[in-house]
Image: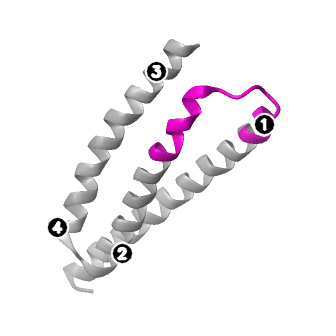
Amino acid sequence: PVAYDLRTVVASLKISNQVERIADYATNIAKFTLALKDLPSFPEIKELPTLIKMPEQMFKSALIAFETSDLNLALKVWHMDQEVDVYYKAYLQKIFEAM
């Protein structure tokens, strides 16, 4: 195999590892959701859909970037990760203050 093929194989292995990790997190979130569904509503939860949509879009864009070898889209996803980190930390801070 040529270098491009080797990079594709290595990237595919890394991607599959991350997809499995995402699935594990999703499973744990679903289990916690079932356990918490009968508790009173928490006002700060309103912002959660925004926090979910950003990584969801990142995931879709990352797969497209890999499939099409789009370096610019891959860089955009990388920058989006920093935005998500900032938003996530602010969201956690707001929840901790509410507690």
Q: Nearer the viewer, residue 4 or 37?
A: 37
Residue type for callout 2: Val
Please state which of the two labelled residues, at mark 4 or mark 3, is closer to the viewer: 3
**Mark 3 or mark 2, which has the lower sequence index?**
2
Q: Which residue is mark 2?
A: 9
State the image coordinates of residue 90 (x, y, percent, origin top left): 38, 27
Which disc is residue 72 wearing?
4
Quote the CA–CA distance across marks 2 and 4. 21 Å
Quote the CA–CA distance across marks 3 and 2. 41 Å
Binning the other alpha carbons within 10 Å of mark 4 as few (below 14), some (14 to 19) or many (20 upward) gives few
Residue type for callout 3: Lys
Q: Secondary structure at mark 1?
A: loop
Q: Which residue is mark 1?
A: 37
Which secondary structure type mostly characterizes the magenta part of the structure?
Answer: helix
Binning the other alpha carbons within 10 Å of mark 3 as few (below 14), some (14 to 19) or many (20 upward) gives few
Residue drawn at 22 percent across, 85 percent down = 2
State the image coordinates of residue 96 (x, y, percent, origin top left): 51, 16
Q: Look at the picture and state if 76 lies above or below 45.
A: below
Residue drawn at 46 percent across, 43 percent down = 51
Q: Which residue is mark 3?
A: 94
Residue type for callout 1: Lys
Q: Is residue 62 magenta?
A: no
**Mark 1 or mark 4, which has the lower sequence index?**
1
Span colored in magenta = 33-51
State the image coordinates of residue 78 (x, y, percent, origin top left): 25, 53
